[in-house]
Amino acid sequence: MKLTRRQSKQRRHRRIRGRVNGSTERPRLAVFRSHEHIYAQIIDDTQQHTLVAASTLEPELKSKLASCANCEASAEVGKLIAVRSKEKGITKVVFDRGGNLYHGRIKALAEAAREAGLDF
């Protein structure tokens, strides 16, 4: 029986979340991608608390981007989440791609966050 795209993504997401868990020392960088926007959060799973967040919905990013649904926008979110996390003293994270394939917008966000100083 062939799975739909949505079922495949849900399966991958469950499998990834079984292995990836954020702690106080290494919080989880969770990424959610919709058709028009991309969202990133750094989460401490032990306290169930979001430490830092960034997305393409923020006015400062939205005004300078031509489109919020491309790799350039994702890279900007990656840089922004890295800058905000460094301000909070977070340098090491674990990456949770949220069931998405490591390709395109997800990859652009991850590489930009690494270049801006996050270690994962």
Image (cartoon, helix red, strand yellow):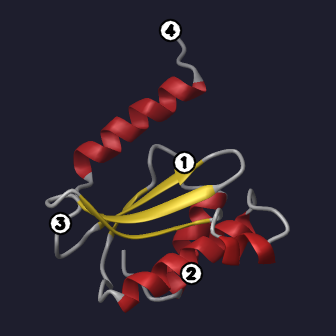
- Mark earlier in primary sequence (1, 4): 4
Q: Position of residue 10 (x, y in %)?
A: 44, 31
Q: Distance between the residues labelled 3 and 2?
A: 22 Å
Where 39 sits versus 7, above or below? below
Q: Distance between the residues labelled 4 and 2?
A: 41 Å
- Mark earlier in primary sequence (4, 2): 4
Comparing 103 with 113, the one in front is: 113
Q: Position of residue 4 (x, y in %)?
A: 57, 20
Query: Which residue type carries mark 3?
Result: Ser
Query: Which residue type carries mark 2?
Result: Lys
Location of mark 4 (residue): 1
Find out whether the residues at labels 4 and 2 contact each other: C-beta distance under 8 Å.
no
* 95 relative to 33 in the view: left or right: left
Q: Residue furthest top?
A: 1
Q: Is mark 3 on a helix, strand or loop?
A: loop
Q: Position of residue 27 (x, y in %)?
A: 26, 68
Q: Quadrant of residue 37?
A: bottom right
* 55 relative to 97 in the view: left or right: right
Can you tell which of label 3 and label 1 is closer to the viewer? 3
Where 92 sits versus 42, above or below? below
Q: Where is residue 60 in the image (x, y as percent from the top left)?
A: 68, 78
Can you tell which of label 1 and label 4 is closer to the viewer? 1
Q: How crowded is mark 3: few (under 14 residues within 10 Å), some or many (20 or more)?
A: some
Q: What element carries label 1?
A: loop
Q: Tell me the residue at 39%/82% (across/down).
A: 85
Q: What element carries label 4?
A: loop
Q: Which quadrant: the C terminus?
A: bottom left
